[in-house]
Amino acid sequence: MARLKPSTIPGWPIPFDSRFELDWGRPSYARRLLLEHLDQAHDGASRRTGIVARQLRRLRRLLPEPPATILDAGCGPGLYAVPLAQAGYHVTGIDVNRAALTHARRVARGQSLAGSLRLQTADLRTPLPEQRFDAVLLIYYMLEAFPRKEQSAVLRNLARSLRPGGRVVVEMRLQPDQPPGRMEWWDVVPRSVLGDRPHLLLGDTTYDRRRNLYVLREIAVLDDGTVAMQQTSAWLCPFDRIPALFQGAGLTVERLFDGWTAGSASQLSDSVLVIARR
């Protein structure tokens, strides 16, 4: 972990600050993030298995029938990709986290899914696999991790990966689980994405509702005086702008669900599940 002078840490976070923004593909972070993905004590990196199972049942009602081809964009350790392949879909999972992909491959081999699940390293901002899919998934608020101007480019890449008439399912937050302003905390943790040894972890979250920006920062202070910081930023697309965001990528929004329910979304929803077609 690189040494950081506390005096260089901004008093108020700068959204999408390249100096501190979490690099999902960095090997040390990728390895630690995998542990957080698999941790069943929280839903901070990936959701717990019971929640994933319920969401998979909902997805099966939204996706075409097997053996349709599915692209799981930002698949992580395969929590959705592996069960979908087990259900008879032909799934391609992509992610920048090589450690997570290695874990997913290990699970897939154990389930004898080599013929129905492919996993590869890819960045959603660059051209994606040349194969055209019946459906594309972008689950767990992945889109918001890109600045506003890049979100259209990501959606265009996903649209190009769809067959004509293909469907994209995108989960989006409308607001974080906190009021506007700033919240702070601290804790002593055995490990985190910033270190493998016990350390003091300081954190804050800021939500600027006017600019639709949310930032989570974490600062680790180790016993040898090492200080490191990482942040994850989000631009939360307002409800009434979602159709235009997708339309700009060549996608037509068909339904906006209130989270993972079958009810219609509204501006009062915390999150939405967007169903759009090419």
Image (spheres, grey):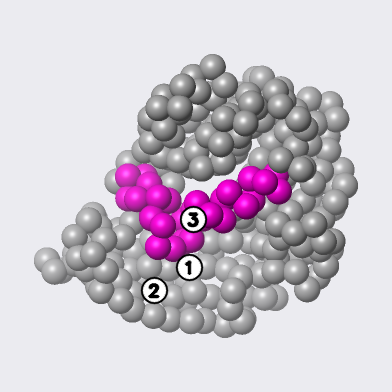
Residue drawn at (39%, 74%) of the image:
203
- Asked whether disc 2 touches disc 1, contact meaning CB atoms under 8 Å apart, the reply is yes
Q: Secondary structure at mark 2?
A: strand
Q: Is residue 276 above or below residue 122?
A: below
Please give the residue where the numbered disc 2 appears in the rendered image: 203
Residue that appears at 65% across and 27% down: 89
Residue underneath mark 1: 216
**Can residue 227 be seen in the rendering of this structure?**
no
Instruction: Please name which of the two marks, 3 or 1, marks the residue nearer to the observer.
Output: 3
Q: Position of residue 213 (x, y in %)?
A: 62, 68
Where 254 sits versus 156, above or below? below
Q: Report x, y in % for residue 214.
A: 57, 68
Where's the C terminus, which quadrant? top right
Residue 112 seen in this snapshot: yes
Q: CA distance from mark 2 to mark 3?
A: 23 Å
Q: Nearer the viewer, residue 129 or 119?
A: 119
Q: CA distance from mark 3 to mark 1?
A: 21 Å
210 left or right, relative to 13:
right
**Is residue 204 located in the magenta-colored stretch of the structure?**
no
Which badge, 2 or 3, comes first in the chain's sequence? Answer: 3
Q: Helix, strand, or loop for circle 1?
A: strand
Whether residue 41 appears in magenta in the rendering, the answer is: yes
Give the label on residue 21, or none: none
- Residue underneath mark 3: 48
Residue at image location 47% in from the left, 61% down from the top: 44
**Rendered residue at 79%/46% (across/down):** 275
Q: Earlier in the sequence, mark 3 or mark 1?
A: 3
Name the main secondary structure of what is drawn in magenta.
Answer: helix
